[in-house]
Image (tube, rainbow, N blue to C red):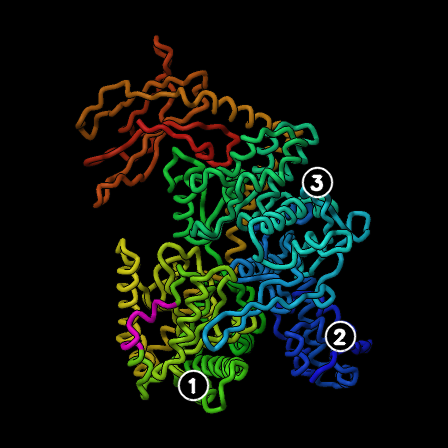
Amino acid sequence: MSGTIFSVEVRPRLPKRISRLEELANDLYYSWDRSARRLLANMDLETWHSCNSSPKLFLRRVAQSTLNAAASDPVFLAEYGRVLSVYDTYMQEQPLVSSEYYLDPQKELVAYFSLEFGLHQSMPIYAGGLGILAGDYCKAMSNLWMPFIGVGLLYREGYFTQRILCNGDQQEEYPHVNPEDLPVKPALDADRNELQIQVEMHGHSVHLRVWEAKIGHIRLYLLDSDTPENNPEDRAITYKLYGGDSEQRIRQEIVLGIGGVRALRAMGKTPSVWHINEGHASFLILERCREKMLAGMAFDPALVMVAANTVFTTHTPVPAGHDIFHHDLILSYFTPFLSETGIETDRFLQLGASPSDAHGFNMTALGLRGSSFHNGVSRIHGRVASEMESHIWPQVPPDENPITYVTNGVDAETFLGQPWVALFEMYTGRGWRAKLTDHGFWQQFIDKMPEHAYRSVREIQKAELLEDANQRARVQFHRDGANATQIEEFTQLLDPKHLDTLVIGFARRFATYKRATLLFQDLERLARLVNDPARPVLFLFAGKAHPNDEPGKQMIREIMGISQRPEFRGKLLLLEDYNLSMARKLHPGVDVWLNVPEYPKEACGTSGMKAAMNGALNISVLDGWWDEACNGRNGWAITPSEEPDPAARDRKEALELLNILEHEVIPLYFSDKRAWTQRSKEAIKSILPRFNSIRMAQDYIRQLYLPAKEQGIRMRQEEGAGAHILAAWMQRFRNGWPGVKIRLDSQLRPAIRADESYPIEVALELNELDPKDVVVECVLGRSDTLKQFKPEKTLRFAEERRNDQGEYIFRINLNSAHGRQPLTGLEQFKIRIYPSHPLLSHPFVCGCMIWL
């Protein structure tokens, strides 16, 4: 039919009796509180779904008659009152927070910068795991009443909506987002005027509008370049998340890092801790240095002061995940910055130097050099990151450098299925939310839960998943031209009547290292497993490939092709457009969660946490979080192969995966429901209290924020005296360290009696440094089975005297009884020297160490 389609939005007026619905719709509190969403959805489910479950958009498009009826419906009004009562209690009653997790809201503020935030599908400013993590983190900070703000970008087209064609091709669609449809409002400056700031790019100003989103107790500020003052190229800076080339990326990161700092300053906010969530926001370091230099401070003390209260989190052990800008590109944007501050070009480029690219500016390297506190996001990732970034501290063993770890967690209220929430509240009211990190509570609570009640919840969640997946699959197949018979064949197991089906889920970004196709190494064997009529098995796959990731897209084609083979039709499905809405059904409903990353490239991997806290069992490679979580009773572990050849490694791990499925998972599920339920209970007991975002937030506060706050105070006191002192010392140390030498100055005996002393003396040539500038240490340890020396404890030498050659003599009695265990058996030790200053944030932050 030809002709133009015109549209008009008929907006109702909200009856006064239910006027506070607007307040709920403009607070992302609804992103985790189901009752607030359900209150609206129950008024008009069809309109709710057509509005992408957006409360704000729903209240603009629901019929006036529907609102009028609700305002006089006693059942609706009772639920409305209950929801508001819970909301008001949440906003008014501060939780008890232990002093070890406490930040004073009158004095302190954490500013958290991230390129994406995944809070709810109605707020499409996220792509995947990094954004979901950031969103969950904001929710936890709200729940803890922390003085905390987020800073990000408002994307007019966001990340793409995925369509998968019948041949497996991925199509990306970028629906335009109007801020009017989002739960945001214009941010105001310190004078209460609508805020707009500017950043400079290529000789002209780019104007940025700032939006404010309310997330319970905290606020999220989003920068937006789509303003009339900008030219079309500049307006497009904040259109797409992870879209465009390196030039588009550096422009976005200038907006986030530099524009974000300027926005906070314009609002009169002075964070006491700055948290850079991945390297995208690292330019904030340069902007804060610029501020201090324009106030009269030299670059070195400015950098010391900025780094003091800055936390940097790295999220990826994959080199391609780190932004690197060619020197020509970054200098084209930052030459005016160098002219304004007087920083030499070589010194500037050194901030982003890394061995991976001699002509590139590495944003992770900038983030590490411009911060004093750094972490990976799981125990394994902390170790991998320490090794990957060891060039920052070249003489320090990677396992001792300043990178630590905080294992990620997920928001329990967002990802627990509604049936679990209802059951928990039936037993405890809302009290379970205050017990999220209480291991004893969950152990006792889940153990005492009647088995029939437990299984009932699991079945309800599976039924909801199957129904949701059925609806999605039918739309997908119908659009791709499948006929009714084909659709019925493809959706044969997507029916709540088939609750006996073993449902195995895999939903990740389609990146090659995540190995979504590992399962298909032996298709004949897999077909045999899924075609046993007595043991029906269904695999559900979902995920997006980055638009520029052709190998990832090829994986989608491969999975789609396999799903269409006769032996796999209806037994293996690939659902399109994985997002938060799908995740809230998929994770609670599956029986098993599959995760098979290439070790050790999984930074953390939170998807398995979401499934496990709902009672699903994980089958996963021992990487990321699963290495910490797997106890042998809450799922199954695939041992990482040590095969150097990737193809051989994949074959070996695929064989182990299929063995686990065939000989353990499938037989247990179909032959012993009681044993399966016990394992499922173990998953909740062992994972929910350890891997939720409240625990994660508390770890960040205790391990990183409080030390960063204190280090910032030390550097700022007395008009920055600490920063000047430390910067001057570091310059003196850098000049003197190349000439430092250490030698043994005593004869070491090969054996002593247990009651004899064992003195050791070393002589130091300090090259203009002072003895108090260094620590001389004896590292005691033992060799492992691979003949690798493993440190166990350290003991310090004491300065003894200065000899005739001008060397400083340091001495230790290794077998002294002064507060130490005497030596026993065959002892091994090493001797080292490293720089030391009382104002350093970490003993090895200078990156220098000499071993004897």
Above or below, 302 relative to 765:
below
Neighbor class of circle 1 (other Cα within 10 Å; few <14, some 14-19, many 20+) is many
Work out how far the residue at label 1 is from the one at label 2, CA to CA, in angstroms: 38 Å
**Nearer-N-terminus badge (1/3):** 3
Amino acid type at mark 2:
Arg
Image coordinates for residue 507, horizontal then vertical, percent: 46, 69
Amino acid type at mark 1:
Leu
Q: Is residue 483 visible?
A: yes
Q: Is residue 448 visible?
A: no
Work out how far the residue at label 1 is from the one at label 3, CA to CA, in angstroms: 61 Å
Q: Nearer the viewer, mark 1 or mark 3?
A: 3
Place residue 518 in its image quadrant.
Answer: bottom left
Q: Is 525 one of the magenta-colored residues?
A: yes
- The residue carrying mark 3 is 203
User: Is 160 on the left-hand or right-hand side of 216?
Assistant: left
Q: Secondary structure at mark 2?
A: helix
Q: Residue at x 56, y 75 (%)?
A: 425
Above or below, 837 relative to 100:
above
Above or below, 80 relative to 232:
below
Amino acid type at mark 3:
Gly
Query: In the rendered structure, which segment of residues is drawn in magenta?
Result: 517-526
Place residue 398 in its image quadrant.
Answer: top left
Image coordinates for residue 44, horizontal then vertical, percent: 68, 83
Toward the viewer: 297 or 201? 201
User: Is 290 on the left-hand or right-hand side of 637?
Assistant: right
User: Is 706 on the left-hand or right-hand side of 510?
Assistant: right
**Nearer-N-terminus badge (1/2):** 2
- The residue carrying mark 1 is 493
Q: Residue at x 30, y 67 (%)?
A: 654
**Nearer-N-terminus badge (3/2):** 2
- The residue carrying mark 2 is 60
